[in-house]
Image: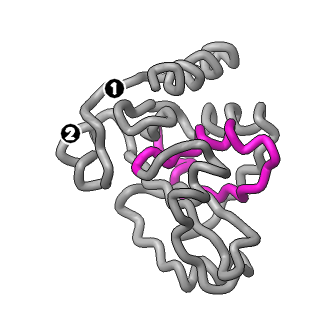
Amino acid sequence: MEDQKQRVYDALKKMGIKYEVVEHEPVHTMEDMDRLGLPEKGTLCKNLFLRDPKGKRHFLITADEKTKVDLKTLGRQLGAGNLSFASEERLEKYLGVKQGSVTPFALMNDTDHAVEFFIDKNLSRCKSMGIHPLENTATVFLSFKDLDKFLWNLDVDVVKIKL
């Protein structure tokens, strides 16, 4: 699995993006992340992989870990009806990652651009944001601007929304 993280690091390096990596034990929840004591490095992000009721549309939502995300309100905001969490099978099919490792970096595996990406616009104000590099055994800290550059290079539309 080490090559998964390395793919992210190599892509960041190739794009000239500055980042800091903190290796840690595997984490599966935001509570696990909080126990690691990383927040002083930047804003930790939670990532939700969601689908519409018919499973036709898939969404990756990135927000500050402290932000409460109301799925009913979000579904209306996105014109998608009642949203629910996508299955682990869908997560692996569309983003190529396992539960606990959801990250905007996984959009590099979505070569068909089947997943719509939305990010809390408040994150654009944070100095540094922490997200996993395709695995939940490390956290990469980088600026919003640099994440945007990374995704732009993948031809991913980054849509800022108010959560």
Identified by mark 2, the residue type is: Leu
Q: Is mark 2 in CB contact (under 8 Å) with mark 1?
A: yes
Image quadrant assignment for residue 151: top right
Which span of residues is magenta-colored? 100-128
Q: What element carries label 2?
A: loop
Q: Is residue 120 visible?
A: no
Residue with the mark numbered 1: 22
User: In the image, is residue 113 part of the stretch drawn in magenta?
Assistant: yes
Identify which residue, 1 or 126, lies in the foreground: 1
Residue 13 in the image, given as x and y percentages of width and height = 61, 14
Image coloring type:
one colour
Secondary structure under the numbered disc 1 in the rendered image: strand
How packed is label 2: few (under 14 Cα within 10 Å), some, or many (20 or more)? few
Residue for point 33% across, 26% down: 22
Q: Mark 2 = which residue?
A: 36
Q: Earlier in the sequence, mark 2 or mark 1?
A: 1
Asked which quadrant contains residue 49, the reply is: bottom right
Residue at the spot 33% in from the left edge and 33% down from the top edge:
41
Q: In this view, does 99 lie to the left or right of 115?
A: left
Q: In this view, does 126 lie above or below 46?
A: above
**Which numbered circle lies on residue 121?**
none
State whether residue 128 is above or below residue 156.
Answer: above
Residue toward you, 152 or 138: 138
Viewer can see residue 24? yes
Could you tell me how far apart the alpha carbons at marks 2 and 1 are, in whole angstroms? 10 Å
Res. 74 image quadrant: bottom right
Residue located 53% across and 64% down the image: 87
Q: Residues within 10 Å of mark 1 (few under 14, many from 20)?
A: few
Image coords of residue 38 (percent x, y): 27, 37
Percent position of residue 94, x then y: 67, 51
Is residue 12 shown above or below 54?
above
